[in-house]
Image (cartoon, grey):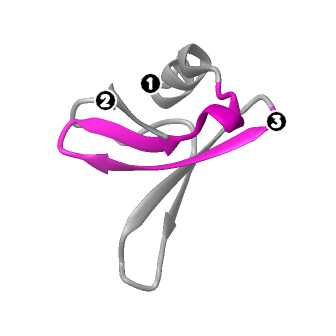
């Protein structure tokens, strides 16, 4: 498992679906290919835990999160 940290500055990660859980934590869901990645915004970064088995294309995730 690895912690991915992508700079987003003051903006919320885009695109993605913002979900608030019962503990009032905000999560962002991004779909990369056939994988869904759940992450959170901390300071000026989007952070997500991914495993090798998920085979997430980190370059594609980076572009999605930054809204490009």
Label 1: how many Cα within 10 Å (few below 14, some 14–19, many 20+): some
Say which label, 3 or 2, has the lower sequence index.
2
* Pointers 1 and 3 in contact (C-beta within 8 Å): no
Q: CA distance from mark 3 to mark 2?
A: 23 Å
Q: CA distance from mark 2 to mark 1?
A: 6 Å
Mark 3 residue element:
loop
Residue to which mark 1 is pinned: 66
Q: Name the disc covering residue 9, or none.
A: none
Residue numbers of the magenta segment: 34-56
Where residue 12 sits in the image (x, y, percent)?
Answer: 36, 42
Residue to which mark 2 is pinned: 8
**In this rendering, would 45 be left or right of 66?**
left
Label 2: how many Cα within 10 Å (few below 14, some 14–19, many 20+): many
Q: Give the quarter of the image for residue 56.
A: top right
**In this rendering, would 9 be left or right of 66?**
left
Q: Please say whether residue 11 is visible from this viewpoint.
A: no
Residue in the image at 23% along x and 30% along y: 9
Residue to which mark 3 is pinned: 34
Say which label, 1 or 3, has the lower sequence index.
3
Residue in the image at 17% along x and 44% along y: 43
Say which label, 2 or 1, has the lower sequence index.
2
Q: Nearer the viewer, mark 1 or mark 3?
A: 3
**In this rendering, would 57 be left or right of 40?**
right
Q: Please say whether residue 20 is visible from this viewpoint.
A: yes
**Residue in front for this viewpoint, 54 or 38:** 54
Residue 53 within the segment the image draws in magenta: yes
């Amino acid at each position: 498992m690895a912690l991915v940290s992508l700079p987003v500055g003051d903006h919320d990660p885009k695109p993605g679906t913002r979900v608030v859980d019962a503990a009032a934590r905000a999560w962002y869901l991004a779909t990369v290919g056939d994988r869904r990645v759940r992450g959170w915004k901390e300071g000026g970064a989007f952070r997500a835990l991914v495993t090798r088995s998920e085979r997430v294309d980190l370059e594609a995730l980076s572009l999605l999160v930054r809204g490009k």
